[in-house]
Image (cartoon, grey):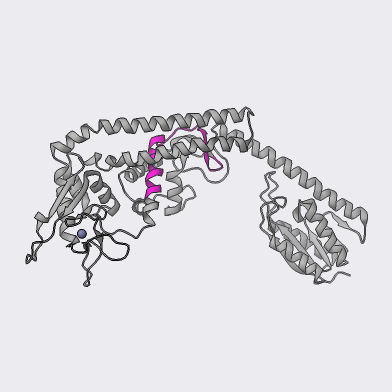
Amino acid sequence: VVKAAGIYARISNDPEGDRLGVDRQVADCRAEAGRRGWPVAGEYIDDDKSAWSGKTRPEFRRLFDDIEGHRLDAVLFWHPDRLTRRPIEMEEFIDVCRRAKLEDIAWIGGQLAGRDDDGLLLLRILGAVASDASAKTSKRIRRKNDDRALAGLPTGGGFRPFGYRDDRVTVEPLEAALIKDAAARVIAGDSLRSIVIDWQAQGVRSPADRPWSLQTFRRMLTGPRLSGQRSHRGEIVAKAVWAPILTPEEGARIRAILALARHERRRPTRRYFLTSILRCGRCGTTLIARPDAKGQRRYVCATGPGRIGCGRLAILAEPVEALIAEAILYRLDTPEVAAALAGAAGADAATAAEHEALANEQARLEELAAAYGEGAFTFREWLAARKAILAKIEAAQKRLSHLSQSAAIDPFVGRSSELRAEWGPMALNRQRAIASALLDRVIVHPAVPGRATFDPSRIEPVWRL
Ligand SMILES: [Zn+2]
């Protein structure tokens, strides 16, 4: 007579589509236990994705422990393939049950009767068949997914992508406009956070009908999907069949800018928009931000451990920042800047060259993908061949992110009044992007002894344009 039965269930998202809910498995097993008059002593539920992948399943192990500890005298599961799909684990299970003399093993529509060797054989066969079928299906599904990706077809499942209708191919114009606007803002130096806050305020919602979070927004905006590129297993593998919302250049630029921003965030936060621009007029060292004892914001030439400055120069932040902002606004309206930007055709040529290099490498990737699609080599070989190309792409993107600096000021040239209106509320990193696009450096000369008020003649901007 059974006194304590254990129910084992496994959450599976195996590709066959037999997405048998774990609740259903447990409910069926409980009903079966009731029918057999087996008291249920415990439920063992793993959320392991696939029982043949060989990942550890803690509840499976706990089941073993309880069998070995004689806390169970019967085991119920929905089907042997829920228990395990790995023959070696099935043998282990049978072995553990034998040693513990646990003889009541049942599943829906089947059971082992006593020390029934036919029953054990059946269990082994069911497990093995499931294992083989699963491996084959998995390979087939993978191959199918690879083929779809290489053909540039959209992925299925889940919510539609933002910017596209339910067919995942047709552009949704209102959302596309929002995406384009966001992309332009990122390229101009706005932070993702400020854009997300605006979207939240405007009530823009994700395809899952939720407000945007920084994380989901970043994933959406940096995804190659928006520039009409199909990614697969974390790599861009083909030109997509859907219409792009951003150009590949814009996509690459955004990824480069955000990668750079992430790199910069690892350093201490910069509340000071002139850090890395101001230089000590005595020794030439870059000034750092450091408030004085009263908490007034200052830039100082720092000395001491790890510092190479002379330690003999400091300036209050407020007035120098105001002065430089004013100088930038004025500078934008000067013929020099207009001419420099006209002459930035040179820089644009360099940018265009980088874009072309990028496009060439992308094309090589696509050729490679096509060759793979024709069965020229295995997925692993394909990945290896891509590595070199991807390194070149990354290098080109890095160079582009430096070239794209002038993008921060393009919209404002000759229209400094617009910039003036926006400057105050503008995000710090955008101010900094504009400053570093225009300024090479600003030299801060030593104060005249005895002069307490701010002396603008101490400030000497060195313009880039
Ligand atoms: Zn100094």
**Residue at x-position 7% and y-position 65%:** 451
Q: Is 242 inside the magenta-drawn segment?
A: yes
The residue stretch that appears in magenta = 232-260
Asked if the stretch drawn in magenta spans residue 219, the answer is: no
Side of 83 where 222 appears, left or right: left
Q: Is residue 295 above or below residue 138?
A: below
Q: Is residue 385 left or right of residue 98?
A: left
- Determine the image quadrant of residue 333: top left
Q: Is residue 392 visible?
A: yes
Write down which quadrant ligand 1 falls in. bottom left
Residue at x 33% of width, y 53% of height: 194
In this picture, residue 341 sits left or right of residue 165: left
Quadrant containing the C terminus is: top left
Instruction: Return the residue nearer the eye: 6 or 365.
Output: 365
Residue at screen point 27% across, 40% down: 406
Determine the residue positioned at 83% across, 65% down: 74
